[in-house]
Image (spheres, helix red, strand yellow):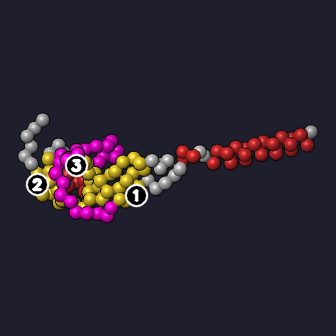
């Protein structure tokens, strides 16, 4: 009887060990790469567009949308534009362009970020 328990114990142990090894191997689609790749260094740009608040209540982000692109304002600079939501502004700042990738290595698009913002012009609000 004691021998049967040992055989059962070692059988279960070998099964669990081999299951752990197989699950750790993953698949070909699970290629992990850096989530972001800096495409270019920060460049000073002048941007004109509508200030929008996007995201969720826990993770709000300020975005300037205009001329077919959108620029995400870094968290440290959000206070400068928070009261200007839905207004058209012209700002100057350092733009960083990053290529986003999914965990499997496919491209998820480009993200443009602005930092060190200086407000140049605020257009008059005309209402909805």
Whether residue 51 can be seen here: no
Instruction: Determine the residue positioned at 17% across, 43% down.
Output: 86
Q: Which residues are magenta?
A: 40-68
- Quarter location, residue 57: top left
Asked whether 89 falls inside the magenta stretch, the response is no
Q: Dot 1 lies on which element? A: strand
The location of residue 21, given as percent across then percent down, is 68, 48
In the depicted structure, whether residue 114 falls above or below residue 1: below
**Disc 1 versus disc 2: nearer the observer:** 1
Q: Dot 3 lies on which element? A: strand
In the depicted structure, whether residue 127 falls above or below residue 111: above
* Chief SS of the magenta region: strand
Identify the residue at the far top of this view. 128
Instruction: Determine the residue positioned at 67% across, 45% down.
Output: 22
Please give the residue where the numbered disc 3 appears in the rendered image: 64
Report the side of 76 relative to 83 (left or right).
right
Separation (CA) of disc 1 from disc 3? 22 Å
Residue 19 marker:
none
The location of residue 12, given as percent across then percent down, is 78, 42
The location of residue 88, given as percent across then percent down, is 14, 47
Instruction: Determine the residue positioned at 16% across, 51% down.
Output: 48
Label 3: few (<14), some (14–19) or many (≥20) C-alpha neighbours in 10 Å: many
Residue 121 marker:
2
* Quarter of the image with the C terminus in it: top left
The location of residue 68, given as percent across then percent down, is 23, 45
Whether residue 108 can be seen here: yes
Residue 37 marker:
1
Label 1: few (<14), some (14–19) or many (≥20) C-alpha neighbours in 10 Å: few
């Amino acid at each position: 009887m004691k021998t049967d328990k040992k055989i059962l114990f070692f059988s279960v142990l070998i099964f669990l060990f081999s299951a752990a090894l197989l699950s750790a191997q993953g698949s070909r689609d699970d290629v992990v790469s850096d989530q972001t790749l800096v495409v270019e260094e920060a460049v000073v740009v002048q941007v004109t567009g509508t200030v929008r608040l996007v995201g969720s209540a826990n993770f709000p982000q300020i975005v300037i949308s205009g001329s077919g692109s959108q620029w995400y304002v870094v968290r440290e600079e959000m206070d400068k534009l928070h009261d200007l939501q839905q207004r058209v502004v012209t700002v100057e700042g350092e733009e960083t362009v990053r290529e986003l990738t999914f965990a499997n290595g496919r491209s998820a698009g480009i993200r443009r970020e602005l930092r060190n913002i200086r407000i140049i012009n605020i257009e008059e609000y005309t209402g909805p």
